[in-house]
Image: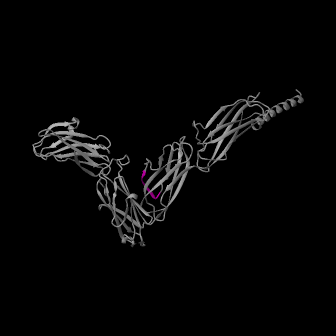
Amino acid sequence: MSKKIIFVLIILVAGFLAFLYYRGTFFSKEILKLEILGPDSVKAGEEVQYTVKYKNNGNFVLQDPKLIFELPDNSLTEDSKTRIEQNLKDIYPGNEEIIQFWGRPLGKEGDLKVAKAALSYIPKNITARYESNTTFTTKIDTVPITLEFDLPSKAEKGKEIAYSLNYFSNIDYPLENLSIKIDSINGFSFQSSDPSSLDKSEWKLQTLNKAQGGRINVKGTITADTGSHLTFGATLGMRQDGGFVELKKVNADLEVIEPLLFISQQINGASNYVASPGEKLHYEIFLRNIGTSPFDNLFVMSRIDGSALDLSTLQSEDGQARPNDNLIVWDSKQVSGLAHLSPQQETKVDFYVTLKSSWTPSDADKNSLLLKNRVNVSDISQEFDTKVNTKLEILQKVDMDSPGNYTIAWQVKNYFNDAKNVKVRLVLPQGAVLTGQISPENQSSNFSMDNTSREVIWSVGSLAAGTGVTNSGPQLSFQVSSLPGASIGPATVLGEDQSTGASVRGNAIVQ
């Protein structure tokens, strides 16, 4: 073969390869124009319309086109799909088409959310598949969710404080799988929260619709040194695909200051008093100046709350009682000790209020019946909780069956807290004898009598809060044979309150 022929063959092969290369580059970069149209900025959770636009600028039919569109990470959709694949019709030269997709990007303020599109195709008369790619970026400029601390700016070392974290959604779409995380912080000892959290750091929320919100209440003690600045932080986000998508974050600062005024409280002479229904309570609020400078013209305000309170009985000799507002206020004109309180000096104010004897307990009362007293003095506040015992009650009815024979019927009620070791006691008169008739029979094993003391005991056991008040309580009846003229006195019911730990006693209401 001559050199000339070889040279021609080399030229032909090189030209063919160059043609293939040129054609591949031409198809992949210039023939198909692919772009995504959408808003440059959005609110988090706002519905966004993405328009995928494509056009065949070449002279070849693009066959078997396939489009893959991916919504930005953590987007919400009606069917939960964020990656959509579509087979398209052949794209002829000059054809221009659009396809629209919808989603709701989620993220925190300032996040850049990227949508992606890829369109692959096979040019007619060519076996290779080519692909064009493009992206579009949208910025989340606002997040229509409120997350804020209700936290004092200053607190004393060693003081117990209560703060709230309020949340609210104005996103026009239900948010599911939400959680709030509150950062742990050195210098603050977590004690309790409402609602409670198993790990003391994350609270799972119910589905949050537009214009809905809630609150997390936290109690704890300031343990940081005086002069410290504590930063409380919280994040609201959504659990999605095994991760946590942050939507809103908030911080609040608190300065730890030197204790200045120590506020304490006693009820009926005790600092840890447990109240009982129907009882008159004498509140004494003590103020001690533990700082180095005096206080002048102090103003004291006490707000009491609790369903057990009979506010019509609220009174104070030296203060102004305002039952309609649950308030008692004192100033230096009424209480001389408030005019000037020197370092290490103590003064006090007091008031009286009576608890209701009985009322139908609400679900909120059961096992959590508390009296709250929040005392505010010169921007210093202290809240005191006082537990209230349950009320045990027994209804007693005595019927004469025949001369000398009586049936005694009992029904037990337990109002507010769960109780255990509940017993009913009754001393029978001399000459009274049990006939052995007891109803219901399954209670006979819980019924006994001491012949020496003549005391009859019915061991009721444990009673849930509200038993006999909001439903039918345990009942027992038994028969006695008594000498003519003997009177049967009222029974007594006793038990242990499982919330307060105190012994509770109630007398029978004879019907």
Which of the pair 345/145 is nearer the observer?
145
78 up-or-down from 285: above or below: above
Residue 353 percent coordinates (x, y): 32, 59
- On-image quarter of the N terminus: top right
Residue 146 percent coordinates (x, y): 54, 51
142 up-or-down from 19: above or below: below
| Residue at figure coordinates x 36%, y 72% from the top left | 336
View extreme (top): residue:
1
Judge from the rendering whether residue 278 lies leftward or rightward of residue 486; answer left or right: right
Can residue 236 be spotted in the picture?
yes
Judge from the rendering whether residue 488 lies leftward or rightward of residue 340; answer left or right: left
Residue 35 percent coordinates (x, y): 71, 40
230 up-or-down from 52: above or below: below
- Residue 194 is inside the magenta segment: no
Which of the pair 152/397 is nearer the observer?
397
Query: Tag count in the figure?
Result: 0
Which stretch did the figure color magenta? 186-193
Residue 152 percent coordinates (x, y): 47, 60
Can residue 158 be spotted in the picture?
no
- On-image quarter of the C terminus: top left
Which of the pair 496/257 is nearer the observer?
496
Question: Would you identify the image quadrant in which residue 459 lies?
Answer: top left
Which of the pair 334/369 is nearer the observer?
334
Most common SS among magenta residues: strand
Question: Would you identify the image quadrant in which residue 402 lies?
Answer: top left
Coloring scheme used: one colour
Judge from the rendering whether residue 96 lies leftward or rightward of residue 268; answer left or right: right
| Residue at figure coordinates x 72%, y 36% from the top left | 54
- Residue 187 is inside the magenta segment: yes
